[in-house]
Image: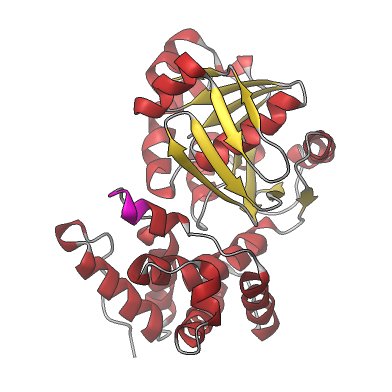
């Protein structure tokens, strides 16, 4: 198959490398020094299950629009930071209308798929998430990744034709490329279950500088992680998703037993990049306001993290309705 990966950072490069190793055509969209290194030196991937080093096809988004057509690709995979989704979809909008290529989101948050669907419709939208993977650019053209890097995907917003028929073939292809994959008939619920983890550990890790294991095993901070996870579950019903205590317990157990990793938000903070705070905690707080649900721990951590960012505070929320 012919894949286009838009947002080829740590996660995108990992999956791109696995697909290349399986013999597929992969084009990467990147920018800056990382793009230059990919073009001049190729990609080097470090992973405990086997690495990759070799030449890759990489362009910036402006070059993509000039040199390629949407019909040149069988699947477009978005691995962007969530705050970039709306802008990139607007930039690609007319180009995407030239064909009916499906788009798979492998991003944090619960709002990306609805933004993608706004441009290309539900019929071309695949919801998805990367599970149990940490992936970061450690130098231009060099990516280090940890974990089994499972993909969970499904038709948006729930199982529907015609993409439902496309999914089994894509699942088999990913499995053959050493990407453990599962199809979900309710991808929206899967996205919210991952948001339980992301809201539980990402902002706290960026605030404290601690990895996921240190956070979740700390006698005090571990309770805060659990409380933020529970607050996430409480507001999921704003999206007609019912999560219960068992979902929270499963996600808390998962993060406690997973390898100690730096969250993406902590890495972004260390590198002075914008945080995905709005896509993760902002999604929780906005829905809490809509439902009139108190989310005190999430609100406190977001406030402290925004203050630590100074003028670049990334979320401003109205008080919870009582």
Judged left or right of residue 281, residue 233 is right
Q: Nearer the viewer, residue 142 or 307?
A: 142
Q: Position of residue 10 (x, y in %)?
A: 52, 41
Most extreme residue toward the top is 67
* Among the 4 quarters of the image, the one containing residue 123: top right
At x 34%, y 76%, the residue is 301
At x 39%, y 83%, the residue is 297
What range is drawn magenta here? 268-272
Q: Nearer the viewer, residue 277 or 116?
A: 277
Q: Position of residue 220 (x, y in %)?
A: 45, 89
Figure colour scheme? secondary structure
At x 48%, y 35%, the residue is 7
When the figure is inspected, residue 115 is found, relative to residue 33, above or below; the finding is below
The secondary structure making up most of the magenta span is: helix
Q: How many numbered discs, if any?
A: 0
Question: Can residue 217 be seen here?
Answer: yes
* Among the 4 quarters of the image, the one containing residue 257: bottom right
Residue 314 magenta = no
Judged left or right of residue 174, residue 275 is left
Quarter of the image containing the N terminus? Answer: top right
When the figure is inspected, residue 301 is found, relative to residue 306, above or below; the finding is below
Most extreme residue toward the left is 311
Q: Position of residue 211 (x, y in %)?
A: 48, 66
Question: Can residue 77 be seen here?
Answer: no
At x 71%, y 29%, the residue is 19
Quarter of the image containing the C terminus? Answer: bottom left
Q: Nearer the viewer, residue 31 or 315?
A: 31
When the figure is inspected, residue 111 is found, relative to residue 33, above or below; the finding is below
Judged left or right of residue 114, residue 176 is right
Q: Position of residue 262 (x, y in %)?
A: 48, 59
Residue 271 magenta = yes
């Amino acid at each position: 198959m012919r894949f286009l990966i838009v947002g080829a950072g740590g996660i995108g490069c990992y999956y791109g490398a696995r697909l290349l190793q399986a013999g597929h055509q992969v084009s990467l969209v990147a920018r800056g020094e990382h793009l230059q290194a990919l073009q001049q030196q190729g990609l080097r991937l470090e992973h405990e299950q086997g690495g990759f080093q070799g030449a890759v096809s990489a362009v910036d988004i402006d070059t993509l629009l000039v040199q390629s057509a949407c019909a040149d690709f069988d699947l477009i995979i978005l691995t962007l930071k969530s705050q970039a989704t709306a802008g990139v979809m607007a930039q690609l909008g007319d180009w995407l209308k030239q064909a009916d290529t499906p788009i798979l989101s492998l991003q944090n948050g619960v709002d990306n798929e609805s933004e993608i669907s706004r441009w290309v419709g539900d019929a071309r939208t695949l919801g998805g998430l990367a599970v149990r993977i940490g992936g970061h650019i450690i130098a231009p053209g060099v990516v280090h990744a940890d974990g089994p890097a499972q993909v969970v995907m499904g038709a948006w917003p729930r199982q529907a034709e015609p993409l439902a028929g496309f999914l089994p073939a894509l699942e088999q292809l990913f499995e053959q490329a050493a990407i453990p994959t599962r199809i979900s008939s309710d991808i929206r619920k899967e996205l919210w279950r991952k948001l339980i983890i992301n809201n539980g550990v990402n902002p706290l890790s960026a605030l404290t500088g601690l990895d996921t294991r240190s956070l979740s095993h700390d006698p005090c901070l571990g309770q805060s992680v659990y409380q933020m996870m529970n607050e996430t579950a409480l507001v999921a019903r704003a999206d007609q998703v019912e999560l219960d205590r068992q979902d929270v317990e499963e996600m808390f157990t998962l993060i406690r037993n997973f390898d100690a990793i730096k969250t993406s938000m902590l890495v972004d903070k260390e590198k002075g990049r914008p945080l995905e705070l709005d896509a993760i905690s902002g999604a929780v707080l906005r829905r809490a306001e809509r439902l009139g649900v108190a989310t005190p721990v999430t609100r406190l951590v977001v406030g402290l993290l925004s203050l630590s960012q100074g003028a670049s505070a990334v979320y401003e929320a109205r008080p919870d309705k009582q």
